[in-house]
Image (tube, grey):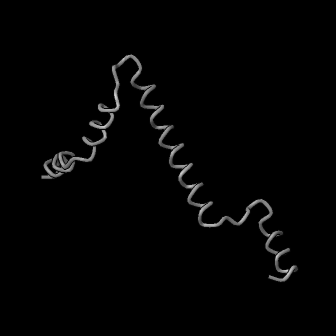
Amino acid sequence: MPASKQKNVENMHPTHPVLNEAEICQLKNSIESSAANMWEMRIRRACQGIKCTRRFNAQYYSSLNTSSVTNEIDSNEN
């Protein structure tokens, strides 16, 4: 890339470095893990005083994904 063209790119995005694919993946993973940690902390805070285990959380989340929710909605529409 000619020096003048490189300069233009830098001027357009002085605070946005160009990331390669590996850096993008690393950034995405760190964002996802921090989001997961944030939710885990919220759950723990909400469960203070209750014996709250990972098994309970897993059962809770799996119960959200069951078809019983959609069955309930279908029966309400009839």
Which residue appears farthest toward the front when viewing the image? 22
Residue 68 at x, y percent in the picture: 17, 45
Q: Which quadrant of the view contains residue 10?
A: bottom right
Residue 61 at x, y percent in the picture: 31, 40
Q: Which of 23 and 58 is in front in this view?
A: 23
Q: How many labels does the image show?
A: 0
Residue 13 at x, y percent in the picture: 77, 66
State the residue at coordinates (47%, 42%): 36
Which residue appears farthest toward the bottom when viewing the image? 2
Residue 59 shown left or right of residue 45 in the figure: left
Q: In this view, does 53 lie above or below 23?
A: above
State the residue at coordinates (85%, 74%): 7
Residue 72 at x, y percent in the picture: 17, 46
State the residue at coordinates (26%, 36%): 59
Q: Nearer the viewer, residue 17 or 26?
A: 26
Which quadrant: the N terminus? bottom right
Q: Is residue 9 above or below residue 35?
A: below
